[in-house]
Image (cartoon, rainbow, N blue to C red):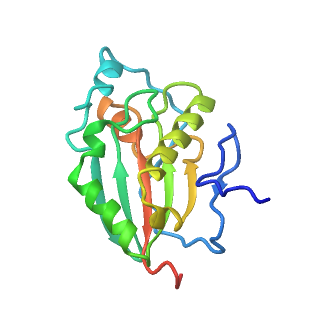
Amino acid sequence: MGRAPQPLPQYTPPGPVEQMPNMATQPQCSPLAKVHSAAVFPYVANEVATSRTEVGHLGVDVSLVPPTGICQYLIIWDFGVDWRHLKNIAKRDALLAAQLIRFETDKSLQFQIVGYSDSAGGERNNVFLRTGRARNVFHLFGPSARSRVFSVKPASHYEYLKDNTTVMNRAANRAVVVEIFAGGGTI
């Protein structure tokens, strides 16, 4: 009697990078510009409350970075402070919907999903948030696209998309980056 396959490995904080089965080689993208810093900046008045509203701090919750070589980046940001779930406004975003259809129908694409957090809070909690955000984005994918995800993981310790010095930058750091690799079967 065999066990039913799990769509995603169970998370055990703080664990190693979660590797998806059936992907022998992992393609590499030209990296996004990132910030590495152990500096922590406190939240300002109303920052947490505003982050948990549908509008949040940023005007746009989903963006697509133009292709760089074999890959492209889809970024979903402005997660609420201490939230792992996506806001309804992000889930209804037209760009996200279009990309999810593209991911499901273009069988040449492979994906790595990386979760981010801002610098506030303990690092163990930030790893939990990063991983949870990445997993929740993974679960938006259709079955075909899910089968081509080779990694769902938290960003490295003290790695951010922007520095944490401003409210806007912290909102941008509460994010998930979907790395989109073209030509999945030939990389």
Q: Vertical placement of 64 versus 175: above or below?
A: below
Locate residue 164, reporting x and y percent: 41, 34
Q: Residue at (42%, 36%) from the top-left corner?
A: 85
Determine the residue located farthest toward the top in the rendered image: 45
Could you say which quadrant of the image residue 58 lies in? top left
Say left or right for 103 vs 7: left
In the picture, measured across the screen, residue 183 lies left or right of residue 22, that is left
Q: Nearer the viewer, residue 31 or 102?
A: 102
Residue at the far right: name it.
1
Q: Quick one: which residue is furthest to the front in this view? A: 1
The residue sitting at 41% across, 27% down in the picture is 81
Q: Position of residue 152 (x, y in %)?
A: 56, 53
Indicate the position of residue 105 as horizontal and vertical percent values. 36, 72
- What is the number of callouts on the image? 0
**Foreground residue among 161 and 59:** 59
Q: Quadrant of residue 14?
A: top right
> What is the quadrant of the N terminus in the image?
bottom right
Closer to the camera in the image, 81 or 34: 81
| Residue at image point 52% right, 35% down | 129
Name above or below for residue 164 compared with residue 179.
Answer: above
Question: Image quarter for residue 165?
Answer: top left
**106 relative to 40 in the view: left or right:** left
Provide residue 168's location: percent of width, then percent of height: 29, 34
Query: Which residue is at 41% across, 43% downward?
Result: 175
